[in-house]
């Protein structure tokens, strides 16, 4: 083993011995040749040429004009640099260190590189190349980009940014290792201890459709594609972008913003805030503390975000401004509309559904429901069960349609509390009541006369009951629930044949 030292100020040519040599050039544009052995070559200041030869060689680079020459299969070599550097061909490993202002980036090559930042002062950007690289950051705020290949990237205690472009890329962060971010052009799930995820918007390279968080309070940003973004645990902020996105908060008190497109937002557990943006958005509400916002970002004089929006709720819910429709699911009992023309749909339990202002369509489910139209010209349909319907102000329609033949046990015995003849209407569907016309409708004095009528639809002026005569004869209404009265007009109001509309 030999130590060979050049002169200062001269352009030296220094050659190794074939053993493990240490060769130092000093000042000047030097030529250092290690030959065989595991050599250390340090050209010193100025622009040097260094050739290690065979063996596992280490090069020190401190000038951008330094050149390192390695042939294929000449060992596992390491370049240590205090300036910006790109690994030359056939050199495997790179270490950047020092505090020189000329040190900003370290770049790999086509081999499987190991690239390490040992600088405690300078924030160095690390770039792999075409191989399966290992990148290791420092205590500063590093950018780590493995390039193509399946790369392993480990940050330090700084606020690091990772660039992921392969499903095989691995990101590693320690606990309390800064606030870190992944920018990914492929589907990606955040590793433990990484806070933020951005799906790349480079449409020429990105195939990222799905992004998933972790147990931290994540920020997740989608791109121009139709994304599926999931926060999992933590209080997350999730932003969709321009596609038709699905955003799911998971556990925690999350903020979801769909952006442009027809988005679906699922708050999950916790008190979540969901903002749809433009488009026809769907909100899944599972907690009484959830907030649906279709107003944020709307300027003066423009009170509505575009789109027809739907809330699907498993808890009682009141529609906020600019949200159009509401469907109750699960055990939600009560649903209330707003000033728009709402569609409100109940579920399998007893619901209280109220439209408020607007021309609303309110549809009960399988329970014994209470339906209130409120202001406007509303359409109310109790569906199955014994329902109580109040149209409110306006010209209201009361619909009876099982989407199947009439069955008294299914359609129930409903009550209409505020029917006004000549204003409101009763709509009968022929799927349920058969091929009827207005010629099949009769008004009679009382229930006894109704039982003697051979008309199919009979109104009893004494009781306000409306009967369906299934057998079409003068002997009762039919057997086994195939006929009978299906609604009572409370207060026995005036009634006319023209108050009934037949719907094909």
Image: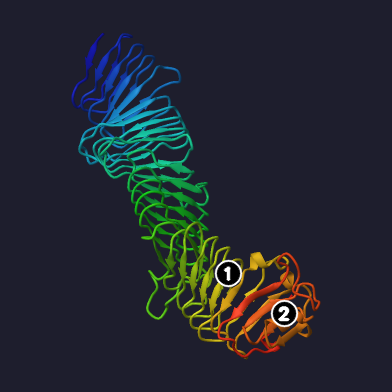
Rendering coords of residue 147 (x, y %): 44, 37
| Residue 316 sits above or below residue 503 on the image | above
C-alpha gap between disc 2 and disc 1: 22 Å
Q: Residue at x 23, y 28 (%)?
A: 28
Q: Which mark is residue 84?
A: none
* Residue 253 coordinates in the image, percent (x, y): 34, 54
Whole-percent x, y for residue 173 in the image: 32, 36
Mark 2 or mark 1: name the one nearer the start of the chain.
Answer: 1
Question: Is residue 352 placed above or below 126 in the rendered structure?
Answer: below
Q: Quadrant of the N terminus?
A: top left
Q: Residue at x 64, y 68 (%)?
A: 411
Check disc 1 and report the residue beneath it: 386
* Residue in the foreground of this view, choosing between 254 and 432: 432
The answer to the question of whether label 2 and label 1 lie on touching residues, with beta carbons closer than 8 A, is: no
Query: Horizontal and vertical percent for residue 372?
Result: 50, 76
SS type, badge 1:
loop
Is residue 31 in view?
A: yes
User: What residue is shown with label 2?
Assistant: 502
Label 1: few (<14), some or many (≥20) within 10 Å?
A: many
- Element assignment for label 2: strand
């Amino acid at each position: 083993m030999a130590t060979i030292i050049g002169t200062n100020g001269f352009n030296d040519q220094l050659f190794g011995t074939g053993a493990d040599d240490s060769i130092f050039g000093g000042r000047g544009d030097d030529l250092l040749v290690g030959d065989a052995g595991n050599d250390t070559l340090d050209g010193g200041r100025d622009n040097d040429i260094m050739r290690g030869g065979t063996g596992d060689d280490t090069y020190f680079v401190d000038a951008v004009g330094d050149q390192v020459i390695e042939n294929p299969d000449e060992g596992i070599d390491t370049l240590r640099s205090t300036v910006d550097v790109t690994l030359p061909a056939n050199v495997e490993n790179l270490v950047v260190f020092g505090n020189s202002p000329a040190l900003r980036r370290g770049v790999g090559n086509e081999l499987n590189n190991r690239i390490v930042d040992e600088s405690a002062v300078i924030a160095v950007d690390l770039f792999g190349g075409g191989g399966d690289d290992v990148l290791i950051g420092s205590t500063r705020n590093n950018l780590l980009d493995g390039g193509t290949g399946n790369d392993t990237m480990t940050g330090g205690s700084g606020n690091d940014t990772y660039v992921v472009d392969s499903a095989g890329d691995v990101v590693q962060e320690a606990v309390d290792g800064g606030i870190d971010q992944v920018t990914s052009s492929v589907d990606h799930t955040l590793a433990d201890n990484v806070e933020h995820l951005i799906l790349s918007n480079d449409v020429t390279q990105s195939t990222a459709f799905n992004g998933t968080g972790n147990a931290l309070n994540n920020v997740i940003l989608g791109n121009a594609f139709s994304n599926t973004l999931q926060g999992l645990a933590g209080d997350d902020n999730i932003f969709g972008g321009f596609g038709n996105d699905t955003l799911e908060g998971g556990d925690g008190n999350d903020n979801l913003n769909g952006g442009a497109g027809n988005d679906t937002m699922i708050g999950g557990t916790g008190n979540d805030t969901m903002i749809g943006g433009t488009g026809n958005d769907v909100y899944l509400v599972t907690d009484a503390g959830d907030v649906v916002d279709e107003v944020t970002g709307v300027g003066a004089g423009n009170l509505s975000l575009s789109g027809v929006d739907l809330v699907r709720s498993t808890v009682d819910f009141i529609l906020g401004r600019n949200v159009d429709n509401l469907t109750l699911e699960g055990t939600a009992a009560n649903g209330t509309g707003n000033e728009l023309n709402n569609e409100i749909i109940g579920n399998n339990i007893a619901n209280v559904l109220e439209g408020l202002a607007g021309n609303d369509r309110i549809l009960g489910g399988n329970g014994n429901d209470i339906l209130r139209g409120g202001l406007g010209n509303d359409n109310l349909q109790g569906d199955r069960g014994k329902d109580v319907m109040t149209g409110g102000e306006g010209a209201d329609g009361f619909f009876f349609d099982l989407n199947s033949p009439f069955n008294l046990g299914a359609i129930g015995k409903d009550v209409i509390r505020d029917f006004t003849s000549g204003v409101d209407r009763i709509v009968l569907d022929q799927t349920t009541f058969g091929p009827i016309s207005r010629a099949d409708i009769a008004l009679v004095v009382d229930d006894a006369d109704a039982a003697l009528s051979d008309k199919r639809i009979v109104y009893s002026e004494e009781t306000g009951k409306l009967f369906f005569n299934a057998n079409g004869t003068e002997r009762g209404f039919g057997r086994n629930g195939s006929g009978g009265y299906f609604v009572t007009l409370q207060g026995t109001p005036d009634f006319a044949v023209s108050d009934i509309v037949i719907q094909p």
